[in-house]
């Protein structure tokens, strides 16, 4: 037997390092066990319940192991087996003909973070589409909005090392369900609590994290910026701000102070649905206890004003001088720091473009596929690391686009997902235990090399090899399209001059698997200012926004489709709807083959008072709808949600969710500054369909 180290590929901050036990069965190597690496300092030998059955996925009977070509109507999942030569020949012929006729912009690649590895996620795939000059997906569905908002305040979205939260004495978990989605950070938070830290969760839903914290501030959805402004009002009015830090390292304080006058606690009470005393108390606790940290992830970004909300929250650490202290400041994705260390352009090679690529927002896929005025139209869609039929907003429009007979769709996948069912050609992709990759996580600072533990099953291939073969089939000759996977890893490591990567080589990663970057022990990124803005200071008032004719100061504005938004819309749809991941063992739609009876069926959470007003009881079948679409769910009466708010589970395969998913309800309205999607600005109505039995889904489970 042999043990091979690797790392979980999923879009999660923890990037758990694992060991795969491989046995030679006589018929070839077989992975017989997978467990967390007990020697890893951060993930500590534990895999989350979502992933510890990963080998069941690798060897599942429904795994795609051969290329497929469609034989039936789109969406029916009717295919025949094909050879790689036939499948790639068909793809190459369709790409070439349509590019010749309509130009390269008719091709739209749609890839995301189904695997987070730098090599399999965005290396040869990006080089291929850069060489073609295809349309380009911009924005994103996760993280880019917060990063943009924070950078408008700080000049960079950089934050503190999450492991430094052990030094904090007050931690605000703002828009993050840490226990469920960042579980390996919780021991760090517990260490801080044992040393006297207070942990506060700010979230519209009483999540497992909120229940485990010292306090839960349960504000109305979409009002985070108002709460931050109310806190700053109290801090400045009571003279609790760090005058020295503000004077030396920030700009625009006087203008900010004038703006704060519009957010006294009584107004914030009316906006946020919190008692004024709660706002005052939270502000005092945050300003008076040091080190003070705010941990944000993406919970607040999926809104029309998501970037402004993140920008506003990012003002708080500078106002109180929290950046001075180890364990103080803003703690968010360390992906920004890895982007500074590793040259992603070296992998993607934008220099290979023949000219500018047409931008298409990731959250507006439905528009891109159904807009008759788009010139040229999208007639080729290539999907990899992604399942847009389920994860893209405004699902009805997306499905209508995927159903176009004149749209030639190619999907690289491991299972026949809802998107793959609409494909003309499906190409079988390897899993993480079958290919090489380099993982730069966004929740900790351990760079990890994933080594293939077993050969690819069947005829499955890594994404990189698929694009190498497709390049050959199209007769492309650019040498960069054919670099090997190990060579790609060496390229990005060898080119780095960042001091945090000193001593980290390909050879060291092969030997050790996972290596912590060389971050100084007491690293405080903005303790002495040094903000990478044009002014060199943190900008309470943003010249960038002013130059674009936008409000340069932090502000709260109601979304049109929010609880304080369009009165006519809210009269028809009086309930705010959050689409959330609420189950410990549930990952996403591409794991649909492993969920089944173990997860039950998705259910609607609704407050007892809202249920009573509609004559609903636990287990009733209900209709949930708005102008975009409707779905049928079981009702679950819950005190986790406050009146006026319902939740719907996100990410279920469509068949498991009754034929449609949560995104049948969600908006594809663009966010304010970063090309994200306002998933959570989402109003619905709920009504009884049929009496039923209590829901099969249990409450959210804490680890």
Image (cartoon, rainbow, N blue to C red):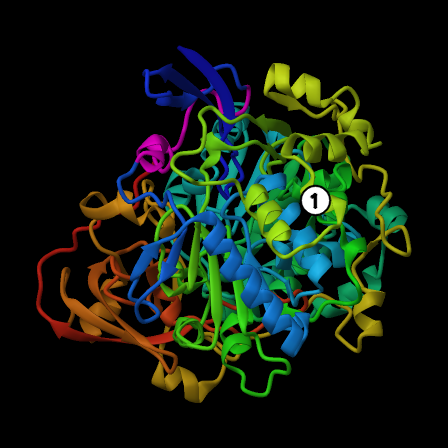
Q: Is residue 150 left or right of residue 460?
A: right
Residue 518 percent across, percent down from the top left: 74, 23
Q: Residue at x 33, y 37 (%)?
A: 57
Which quadrant of the figure contains the C terminus?
Answer: top left
Q: Which residues are magenta?
A: 41-59
Residue 30 percent across, percent down from the top left: 36, 22
Q: Residue at x 65, y 68 (%)?
A: 135
Please, what is the dominant secondary structure of the magenta stretch?
A: loop
Write down the quadrant of residue 195 in the picture.
top right
Q: Residue furthest top?
A: 1
Which quadrant of the figure contains the N terminus?
Answer: top left
Mark 1 = which residue?
336
Q: Nearer the viewer, residue 649 or 243?
A: 649
Regarding residue 361, the answer to whether it shows in the image is no
Write down the quadrant of residue 285 in the picture.
top right
Q: Residue at x 77, y 69 (%)?
A: 258
514 is higher (above) or lower (below) than 226: above
692 is higher (above) or lower (below) than 435: below
Residue 523 percent across, percent down from the top left: 76, 29
Regarding residue 3, the answer to whether it shows in the image is yes
């Amino acid at each position: 037997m042999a043990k091979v180290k690797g790392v979980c590929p999923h879009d999660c901050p923890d990037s758990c390092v694992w060991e795969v036990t491989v046995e030679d069965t006589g018929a070839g190597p077989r992975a017989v066990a997978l467990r967390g690496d007990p020697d890893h300092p951060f993930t500590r030998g534990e895999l989350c319940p979502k992933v510890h059955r990963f080998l069941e996925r690798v060897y599942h009977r429904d795994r795609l192991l051969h290329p497929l070509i469609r034989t039936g109507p789109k969406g029916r999942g009717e295919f025949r087996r094909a050879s790689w030569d036939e499948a790639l020949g068909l793809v190459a012929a369709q790409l070439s003909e349509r590019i010749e006729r309509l130009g390269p912009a008719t091709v739209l690649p749609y890839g995301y973070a189904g695997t987070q590895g730098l090599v399999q996620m965005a290396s040869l795939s990006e080089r291929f589409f850069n060489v073609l000059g295809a349309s380009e997906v911009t924005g994103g569905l996760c993280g880019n909005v917060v990063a943009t908002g924070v950078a408008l305040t700080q000049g960079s979205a950089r934050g503190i090392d999450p492991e430094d939260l052990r030094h904090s004495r007050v931690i605000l978990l703002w828009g993050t369900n840490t226990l469920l989605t960042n579980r390996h950070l919780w021991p760090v938070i517990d260490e801080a609590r044992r040393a006297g830290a207070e942990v506060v969760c700010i979230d519209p839903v009483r999540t497992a994290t909120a229940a485990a914290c010292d306090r839960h501030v349960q504000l109305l959805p979409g009002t985070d910026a108002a709460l931050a402004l109310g806190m700053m009002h109290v801090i400045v009015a009571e003279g609790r701000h760090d005058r020295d830090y503000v004077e030396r390292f920030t700009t625009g304080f006087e203008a900010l102070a004038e703006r704060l006058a519009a957010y006294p606690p009584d107004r914030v009470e009316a906006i946020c649905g919190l008692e004024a005393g709660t706002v005052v108390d939270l502000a005092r606790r945050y300003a008076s206890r040091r080190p003070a940290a705010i941990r944000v992830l993406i919970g607040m970004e999926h809104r029309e004003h998501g970037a402004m909300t993140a920008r506003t929250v990012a003002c708080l650490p500078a106002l109180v001088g929290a950046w001075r202290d180890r364990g103080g400041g803003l703690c968010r994705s360390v992906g920004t720091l890895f982007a500074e260390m590793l040259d992603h352009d070296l992998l993607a090679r934008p220099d290979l473009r023949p000219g500018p690529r047409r931008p298409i927002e990731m959250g507006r896929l439905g528009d891109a596929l159904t807009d008759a005025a788009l010139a040229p139209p999208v007639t080729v869609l290539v999907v990899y690391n992604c399942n847009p039929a389920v994860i893209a907003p405004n699902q009805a429009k997306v499905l209508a686009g995927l159903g176009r007979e004149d749209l030639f769709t190619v999907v690289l996948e491991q299972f026949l997902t809802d998107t793959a069912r609409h494909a003309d050609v499906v190409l079988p992709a390897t899993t993480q235990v079958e290919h090489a990759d380099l993982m730069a996580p966004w929740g900790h600072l351990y760079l990890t090399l994933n080594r293939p533990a077993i050969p690819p099953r069947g005829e499955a291939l890594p994404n990189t090899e698929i694009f190498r073969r497709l390049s050959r089939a199209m007769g492309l000759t650019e040498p960069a399209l054919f670099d090997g996977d190990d060579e790609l890893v060496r390229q990005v490591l060898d080119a780095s001059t960042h001091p945090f990567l000193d001593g980290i080589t390909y050879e060291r990663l092969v030997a050790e698997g996972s290596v912590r970057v060389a971050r100084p022990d007491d690293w405080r990124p903005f303790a002495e200012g040094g903000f990478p803005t044009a002014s060199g200071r943190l900008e309470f008032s943003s010249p960038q926004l002013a130059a674009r004719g936008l409000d340069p100061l932090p502000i709260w504005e109601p979304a049109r489709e929010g609880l304080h938004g369009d009165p006519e819309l809210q009269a028809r749809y009086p309930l705010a709807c959050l689409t959330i991941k609420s189950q410990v063992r549930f990952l996403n739609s591409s794991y649909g083959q492993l969920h089944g009876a173990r997860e039950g069926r998705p259910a609607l959470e609704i407050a007892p008072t809202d249920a009573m007003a509609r004559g609903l009881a636990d287990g009733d079948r209900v209709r949930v709808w708005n102008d975009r679409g409707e779905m049928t769910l079981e009702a679950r009466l819950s005190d986790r949600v406050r009146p006026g708010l319902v939740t719907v589970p996100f990410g279920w395969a469509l068949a498991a969710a009754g034929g449609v998913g949560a995104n049948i309800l969600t908006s594809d309205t663009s966010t304010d500054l970063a090309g994200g999607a306002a998933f959570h600005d989402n109003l619905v109505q709920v009504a009884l369909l049929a009496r039923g039995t209590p829901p099969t889904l249990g409450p959210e489970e804490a680890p």
